[in-house]
Image (cartoon, rainbow, N blue to C red):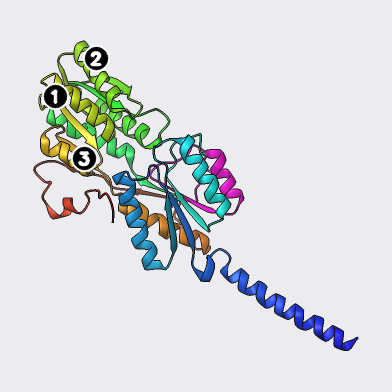
Amino acid sequence: MRRLIGVLTAAALVAAAATACSDSGSGSGSGGKVKITLVQGMAGEEFYETMACGAKRQAATMGVDLKVQGPQKFDPTLQTPIVNSVVASRPDAMLIAPTDTKALIAPLKQAKAAGIKTVLVDTVVDDSSIGVSRISTDNLKGGATAATALSKQIGDKGKVLVISTDPGVSTVDARIKGFEQEIKASHPNVKYVGVQYSHNDVSEASKIVNAALARDPDLAGVFATNLNSATGAGSALQQAGKLGKVKMVGFDAGPAQVKQLQDGVVQALVAQLPGDIGAKGVEQAVAAVKKQAVTPSIPTDATVVTKDNLTQPDIQKILYKAGC
């Protein structure tokens, strides 16, 4: 009996040791590494690729196992299955740019229930209980910055139009709000004629501007909240012979946006810092996994880029890249 007890005790000690080893790795990935998955808003898009590069650099510095996935379109019906797959793979943490403020709530609640630490990067969801940290451009301020830049371009007077993607995307909703507030508060001679939605479709944005020019031939300026809106608007302005006459401010600073600036399609860009967002996302995710202090909300800056400052070294650093 004593021999049996001894054997059982030894077995229990071995099991306890194995459990201790397993526990020390739990929440820190295989081999002690924290495992994180970044779910982009859209794979291949320069903003999210620049974000991924920043996250990868920070992950390499911190010894983190980072994977990157994303849908081919900025679409919650395409992003949701990716989130479900990530939840099934059980990483320690997930960085995600939700493609809709409401549609991603349910799958992200499942991630939370599975014990996966979630950090929201760039975009957010309406449920404030989701996301141990939320890291994004101060888009309200970015919209106000765009309003100031556009007002300057049109001599602080005239009619201005906003073209956006779809309502329900937190980032562009905030840009629109910031733009509207700044025009109303500080530019009394600028008449805001409203926002119209292109559904992130270039041809639809072009149709919107064609109709706006027919309705308001004295239209002075356009704020395009994203690349496709600016591309479609630029095409319409070019066809109408209004390129450079109707001023335009765009958001973001990828290769296509910079070319628009150089070609005179847009007169100014509001550049975000997606690389910083990705890096800070990894930092906060690791802190959450390791039960360290986490910053619930981290706003990042935006910078106005024009032809005049485009070649400056500090501006060149913040232009988006198609890859690392």
Q: Dot 1, how many residues are within 10 Å of its Cα: few (below 14), some (14-19), or many (20+)? A: some
Q: Amino acid at mark 3?
A: Ala
Q: Dot 2, how many residues are within 10 Å of its Cα: few (below 14), some (14-19), or many (20+)? A: few
Q: Dot 3, how many residues are within 10 Å of its Cα: few (below 14), some (14-19), or many (20+)? A: some
Q: Which residues are magenta?
A: 105-133
Task: Label 2, secondary structure: give it.
Answer: helix
3D distance between C-alphas at marks 2 and 3: 25 Å
Q: Earlier in the sequence, mark 2 or mark 1?
A: 2
Residue 91 in picture, x, y percent from top left: 53, 57
Identify the residue at image location x=55%, y=63%. Answer: 27
3D distance between C-alphas at marks 2 and 1: 14 Å
Say left or right for 179 vs 2.
left
Q: Is residue 114 magenta?
A: yes
Task: Label 1, secondary structure: give it.
Answer: helix
Q: Is residue 195 visible?
A: yes
Q: Is residue 130 visible?
A: no
Q: Amino acid at mark 1?
A: Gln
Residue 86 in picture, x, y percent from top left: 52, 50
Answer above or below: position of 220 versus 31: above
Q: Which residue is mark 1?
A: 238
Q: Earlier in the sequence, mark 2 or mark 3?
A: 2
Q: Which residue is mark 2?
A: 211
Residue 321's tag is none
3D distance between C-alphas at marks 1 and 3: 17 Å
Q: Which residue is mark 3?
A: 256
Answer above or below: position of 244 versus 170: above
Closer to the eye: label 2 or 1: 1
Q: Is residue 161 magenta?
A: no
Answer above or below: position of 278 versus 29: above
